[in-house]
Amino acid sequence: MAITGNAETAGLDRILTLELVRVTERAAVAAARWRGRGDEMAADQAAVDAMRRELNRLPIDGTVVIGEGERDEAPMLYIGEKVGRGSGPRVDIALDPLEGTTICAKNQPNSLAVIAIAEGGSLLYAPDVYMQKIAIGPGYAKGTVDLDASVMENIQALAAAKGVPINEITACILDRPRHAKLIEDVRATGAALRLIGDGDVAGVIHTTNPDETGIDIYLGIGGAPEGVLAAAALRCIGGQMQGRLVTQSDAQRERAARMGVKDFDKKFTHDEMAKGDVLFAATGVTDGNLLSGVRFARNGEITTDTVVMRSSSGTVRWIKATHRDLDKFDNEV
């Protein structure tokens, strides 16, 4: 694999698209074996191990910029870890081997295995802190919503742009105590709410297809790493997103500064969080609005459901795969 094209049109080799599908499929299958068993750590570790093994088979010179934590906190897929065979393109990697560990452990909807890659230096090195976010899908004028506008202003603007009354707008928000005022403000507008327990990458992506998901706008504070992954998806599939880091201690600010954050009040757009040519893939672990979960058939076959996207072409592929060679899902390196 190699970077192709001239200096102005250089991008990632499109063959990497299918390689990414294999990465998220392996992680999703590993995690799915722990669905509903109540063991978040075991499910997450299984997904991490599987994703790491598959990444190290790829012909890339990869650096994890969004991972499972920093080196002293995560034994595998930590921020700064080198993955791949060391040949091929130099790429940044953002990943969440199991997005929605709690919902996987409880076998609830919308748990995913997620990864994004971009040319080296293209993804925001987001520390493991919170991020305030707002996102909508494609088809709206730039600036339709804004992180600094009030909830009422954003909901009214979105309804006007969509050409519907406010009561036909649905906002997705993580169900957390910190969002009590936000939830109250959304309800005061007359808009509907979809509260989710976990998985805000899926929550943001759901805004891109409101006819199927019923979600028009994502609001609230979630993880900054998940914000970068969601931004990568929007770069490929369309939409708008803004995010601002939320630090709660001197230690968090020091960690963010070490990762290159200089302006803690900066409002990042999705184009700033994920630049250049971006590839994004997600495989369903549990059933959801976006993807079906992994299926284990009685005859031993495994079925996976994956979406893979590329920003430079705008291509979105939906891949439903039936796996009969199960040796590839074993634990061997």
Image (cartoon, rainbow, N blue to C red):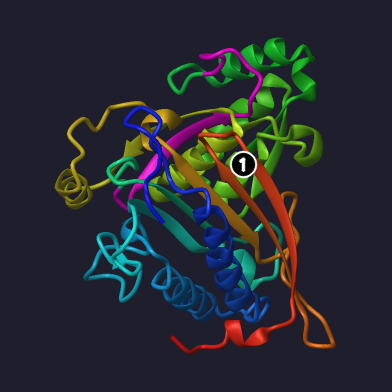
Most foreground residue, 127 or 295: 295
Helix, strand or loop at mark 1: helix
State the image quarter where residue 323 is shown: bottom right
At horizontal 35% and vertical 67% (from top left) the residue drawn is: 84
For the C terminus, the quadrant is bottom left
| Residue 241 visible at all | yes
Q: Look at the magenta stretch and give its main secondary structure.
A: loop
x%, y% of residue 60?
Answer: 36, 60
Most foreground residue, 126 or 265: 126
Most foreground residue, 232 or 36: 232
x%, y% of residue 203?
Answer: 61, 44
x%, y% of residue 189?
Answer: 67, 20
Q: Is residue 253 above or below residue 107?
A: above
Q: Is residue 136 above or below residue 196?
A: above
Residue range of the region highlighted in magenta in the rendering? 127-145
- In the drawing, does residue 246 fall left or right of residue 137? left
| Residue 175 visible at all | no
At horizontal 79% and vertical 14% (from top left) the residue drawn is: 165
x%, y% of residue 293?
Answer: 73, 65
Most foreground residue, 134 or 122: 122
Q: Is residue 73 magenta?
A: no
Classify mark 1: residues with Cα within 10 Å, few (<14), some (14-19) or many (20+).
Answer: many
Q: Which residue is mark 1?
A: 205
* Identity, as a three-letter code, of the amino acid under mark 1: Ile
For the N terminus, the quadrant is bottom left
Q: Is residue 143 magenta?
A: yes
At horizontal 30% and vertical 46% (from top left) the residue drawn is: 120
- In the drawing, does residue 12 fall left or right of residue 326? left
